[in-house]
Amino acid sequence: MKQLKIIKELFSKADGIIICTDAGREGELIHRYIYDYLGCTCPYQRLWISSLTDKAIKEGFQNLRPGSDYDNLYLSAKARSQADWVVGLNASQALSIAAGRGSWSLGRVQTPTLAMICSRYLENKDFKPQTYFKLKLHTAKDATTFAVLSVDKYDTRSTADDALQQVKAAGTVRVTGVEKKEVKQEPPLLYDLTTLQKEANSRLGFSADKTLNISQALYEAKKISYPRTGSRYISADVLDEIPHLIATLKNHPRFGIYAASMDNIVLNIRCVDDKKVTDHHALIITGDPADGLTGDERTIYDMIAGRMLESFSNRCTKENTAVSLDAGGVHFVAKGSVTLLPGWLAVFNATDEEAQDEDVITLPVLAGGEMLPICDAEALEKQTKPRPLHTEASLLSSMESADKECTNEEEREAMKDAGIGTPATRAAIIETLFAREYVVREKKALVPTNKGLVVYLAVKDKKIADVAMTGQWEHALAKIGEGKMDAATFHRSIEVYASQITTELLGIAFERQDDRPCCDCPKCKNGKVTFYPKVAKCNNEHCGLTVFRTIAKKDLTDTQFTALLTNGKTGIIKGFTGSKTGKPFDAAVAFDAGYKTVFEFEDKNKGGGKKGKYK
């Protein structure tokens, strides 16, 4: 509050205000909340920059924008904030009531993310591997020995052995076809935050949160552009700065020679597209000397600098070869790849992913019709494998694509607006799951705890865990930010959604192993009413009878619960507190015809009682 008073005093003295909060959705929300809370009416302009270099700041102040330019962004941010509050508050309370004890946290984005982790974990755990067999044949030409695999899989050892005997009996293998194809491989797009987090997790084991914090530190040190970006493209005006930025890397110990060689090439402009840059462009370096960095900061800086060099480099040219072979009527195939022009692969002297594939080998020159000797042949026993447990890298991909499988960069880009969370929030969502003790790390894998699995199994078929629906909300928020959707329409949808999930969650019947007092349900006659610290609840989800333990500030005992549920009425209980008067009173608690609790007061004059509903 002290700082808020200072801001209020400064606002009251100002003729105009320049807003310099973070240039993003949440930064805009912080500014608007403070401005509205203080009742400020002073006109303001917006500083919107993508880096903190002196040059960028000066240019930003020379090109201040009207605050109204960001009204839609504010409405989007406010809608997100309110939706998270309404959904999280109602869902968490509803699940806690349904559970009957403890505090259980759910959230609009948190819960679908947990669902993806748990679903993958259970799929992996329950996977039943299937055994199959393939033939492996070793042959040679010109002193080069290489191995090829059979095209067909064999379900049993006996069928594989029969085919193996055919191969050995043939003695030679014939080349039936050779297909060569020159392939040009485009360089990768520049990093956005999510892609940087994924690769840092895969290569270095960094958590998404760690990568974000390092990137933020680099941004504040003026080394890189704004980190919380969702774009992998730059605009045409930023392209004008790229030759200078590349030149600043000529003395870099790792990239210096390559950066100097880029003076002689025409820059690849695949990542230049004004239409795909919204609030901020992709991550690039600023050109400031990368001095005084810690080890981890240097690592992330080099990833961003190296990716910038890759993205503006020439395509990699490869010759891919597919060879078909036949031995005794059994068909084999071999794949080879030779890099003709490394192009962007030379930045890190990297081996491309195809070359890392164990099925892609170095082949001698072969021609159709050639007969080669069979040096050896064997039947390999293999097993089908489950999809691996989620890592933070794979989880970020699933969050970005709303759990849809995307096979290339273009598909991933197209799915971005329908993903869950944003580049700025995904790391915090994952960290929340750790803080709630729903998930733990086992090496790089994300593994749900028993607590996390209990939540998942309770809500997995409910709307709150629906990844696709959450992706639709994110898409709607993006549309509000673009001015293409009315925020009021979104609010109405969220209110309906919150009501639906609350009803769903209150109807959940938690199955627990512990021994708790219970009795037959008087309402449905089929279920069991179990006593929990806060409620007594029927385990028949079609019934839903729930009796709160605390009534008029008085906690019912298990004995009183039993009397109410067995007889429909307790004895006189002393010590209730009137909600309006605050005065103590004594009464019995009973059910009305709809199984709502009501008070029955003792009538001392007539020896009877009169009923009054408990509210």
Image: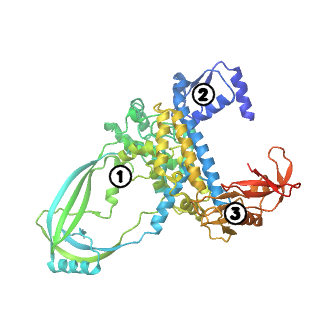
Query: Quarter-wise, where is residue 374 in the image?
Result: bottom left
Q: Mark 3 points at which residue?
A: 532
Q: What residue type is labelled 1?
A: Thr
Disc 2 and disc 1: Cα gap in Å?
41 Å
Residue at 51 percent of width and 51 percent of height: 463
Residue 14 at x, y = what percent? Answer: 67, 20
From the image, tell me which residue sits under label 2: 19
- Image: 499 above or below 550: above
**Residue type beneath disc 3:** Tyr
Of labels 2 and 1, the one closer to you: 1
Against 500, residue 28 (above or below) is above
Label drawn at residue 407: 1
Residue type, label 2 = Ile
- Residues under numbered marks 3 and 2 in contact, where contact means CB atoms less than 8 Å apart: no
Drawn side of residue 561 relative to residue 114, left or right:
right
Residue placed furthest toward the right: 605
Answer with mark 3 or mark 2, whichever residue precedes in sequence.
2
Find the residue positioned furthest to the front.
Answer: 606
- Specify the quadrant of the image occupied by residue 360: bottom left
- The Cα–Cα distance between marks 3 and 1, rounded to whole angstroms, is 48 Å
